[in-house]
């Protein structure tokens, strides 16, 4: 759809941000669960995969484009703990909370970008 | 929408932590509940947390936490020789609970901090959702 092109990378980024905040919230909820391993994913690497410029060129009809869906959780990786813990839990509340806060802020940034795109489009549609 | 699940996840964290706080309160309240036999004496109670993993979908990102059970500490009770105590047994001993006050205080602080961080997560998620709803206004 033409609107998707107008919005660019931002809807995808927003989706990924929401997904990441879900992961980080799960880490924070399990901060005291014995044996729980904190998970996260590399946001910029995943987003890079989603960018059109990074897609494979398909020159024949038989060529299959890799799935362009939302990041699968298989790409989520275990966090390397900074400090060992007795119960095998690798959640560091400060790190998770810092990541969650910056992720929330970046989510709002993506929203701001989208908003201005929408505003620009509305302006163009109204012509006034 | 996946932001909704954050509320469930954080709420599970809050309820688990409040259960933990509840047990701390119970342990601290009973620190002086002496009795005349080992069986009747209050023992320190501790929660066991477990991640709520979905068996059908182990890679699901939203993993809440639940209290798998409450265990009673098996640490030895403190026996004290107080023959004048009304609850003293035949040999003049009373039994005190195996509650460690220092441990319980540390537990309490940890639980309340974890609870707070879950509340902050809910607040952030709420703001994110509210901003999304205002998109395009």
Image (spheres, coloured by chain):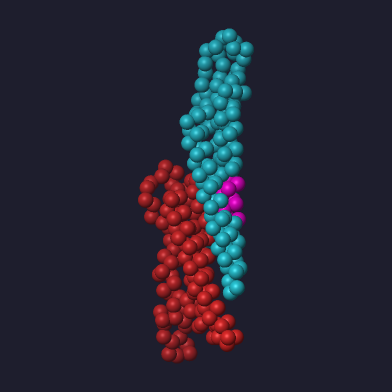
Residue at x 47% of width, y 65% of height: A106
In the image, farthest residue toward the top = B84
* Nearer to me, B54 or B25: B25
Whether residue B96 is visible: yes
In the image, farthest residue toward the bottom = A60
Residue A41 placement: quadrant? bottom left
Residue at x 50% of width, y 39% of height: B109
Asked if the magenta segment contains residue B14, the reply would be yes
In the image, farthest residue toward the front = A128
* Nearer to me, A48 or B126: B126
Residue B105 position in % (x across, y down): 50, 34
Residue A103 lies, with reference to residue A123, above or below; the image says: above
Residue A119 position in % (x across, y down): 55, 78
Asked if the magenta segment contains residue A97, the reply would be no
Quadrant location, the N terminus of chain A: bottom right
Letter of the chain shown cyan in the rendering: B
Residue B88 lies, with reference to residue A32, above or below; the image says: above
Residue at x 47% of width, y 58% of height: A101
A98 left or right of B27 in image: left
A22 left or right of A48 in image: right
User: Which range is magenta?
Assistant: B8-16
Whether residue A33 is visible: no
Check the rendered structure and report the hue given to chain A: red
Residue A28 position in % (x across, y down): 50, 52
Q: Main secondary structure of the magenta part?
A: helix
Residue B131 position in % (x across, y down): 57, 66
Total residue callouts = 0
Residue at x 53% of width, y 52% of height: B120
Residue A81 lies, with reference to residue B132, above or below; the image says: above
Quadrant location, the C terminus of chain A: bottom right
């Amino acid at each position: 759809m033409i609107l998707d092109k107008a919005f660019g990378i931002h809807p995808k980024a927003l989706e990924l941000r929401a997904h990441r905040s879900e992961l980080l919230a799960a880490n924070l909820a399990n901060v005291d669960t014995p044996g729980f391993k904190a998970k996260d994913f590399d946001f910029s690497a995943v987003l890079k995969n989603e960018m059109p410029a990074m897609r494979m060129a398909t020159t024949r009809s038989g060529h299959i484009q890799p799935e362009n869906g939302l990041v699968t959780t298989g790409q989520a990786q275990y966090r390397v703990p900074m400090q060992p813990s007795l119960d095998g839990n690798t959640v560091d509340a400060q790190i998770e909370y810092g990541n969650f806060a910056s992720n929330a802020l970046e989510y709002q940034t993506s929203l701001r970008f989208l908003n201005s795109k929408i505003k620009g489009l509305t302006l163009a549609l109204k012509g006034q | 929408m996946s932001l909704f699940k954050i509320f469930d996840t954080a709420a599970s964290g809050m309820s688990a932590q409040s259960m933990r706080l509840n047990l701390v309160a119970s342990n601290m309240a009973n620190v002086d509940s002496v009795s005349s036999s080992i069986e009747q004496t209050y023992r320190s109670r501790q929660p066991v947390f477990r991640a709520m993993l979905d068996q059908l979908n182990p890679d699901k990102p939203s993993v809440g936490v639940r209290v798998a059970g409450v265990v009673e500490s098996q640490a030895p009770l403190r026996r004290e020789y107080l023959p004048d105590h009304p609850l003293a047994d035949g040999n003049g001993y009373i039994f005190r609970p195996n509650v460690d006050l220092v441990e319980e205080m540390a537990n309490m602080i940890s639980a309340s901090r974890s609870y707070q961080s879950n509340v902050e997560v809910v607040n952030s998620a709420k703001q994110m959702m509210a901003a999304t709803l205002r998109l395009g206004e």
